[in-house]
Image (cartoon, rainbow, N blue to C red):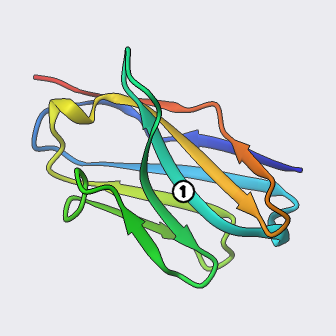
Amino acid sequence: QVQLVESGGGLVQPGGSLRLSCAASGSIFSINAMGWYRQAPGKERELVATITSGGSTNYADSVKGRFTISTDNAKDTLYLHMHSLKPDDTAAYYCNVRTASGLGYWGKGTLVTVSS
């Protein structure tokens, strides 16, 4: 089992920055990929960015060049550095991990609102 707790969301003006964090605990040795997803009101949940245990990253086209995904050295904290935020980035952001055996775990989400 892996437990995930997101933090760092809030209200930010367009053009601003935020850093989201996701603290992982439990069987973190089994994690081989981590990622951020988001869900805006009335829309489907969508991938934002992923990172593998080997450090390979993948980004949605809508956030390339503005968002950066990273982990700490212990790989028990996942980050999402968000810059040049737009109103379209407003959503609940969820942390996800996938284990080597194919199990997936989700956090409860943190809300990001981009508005003037």
Reply above or below: 67 against 54.
above
Q: Is residue 87 left or right of residue 79?
A: left
Quadrant where the C terminus is found in the figure = top left
Would you name the residue on which mark 1 appears?
35
Spot occupied by residue 105 in the image (x, y as percentages of width and height):
74, 46
Spot occupied by residue 99 in the image (x, y as percentages of width and height):
78, 63
Q: Is residue 68 left or right of residue 86?
A: right
Q: Residue at x 74, y 50 (%)?
A: 104
Judge by depth and name the residue closer to the eye, 19 or 41: 41
Reply above or below: 32 against 73.
above
Q: Is residue 67 left or right of residue 38?
A: left
Which quadrant of the figure has residue 68?
bottom left
Reply above or below: 59 against 5.
below
Residue furthest bottom as drawn: 54
Describe the element under mark 1 as helix, strand or loop. Answer: strand
The answer to whether residue 112 shows anywhere in this view is: no
Q: Amino acid at mark 1?
A: Gly
Judge by depth and name the residue closer to the eye, 97 or 44: 44
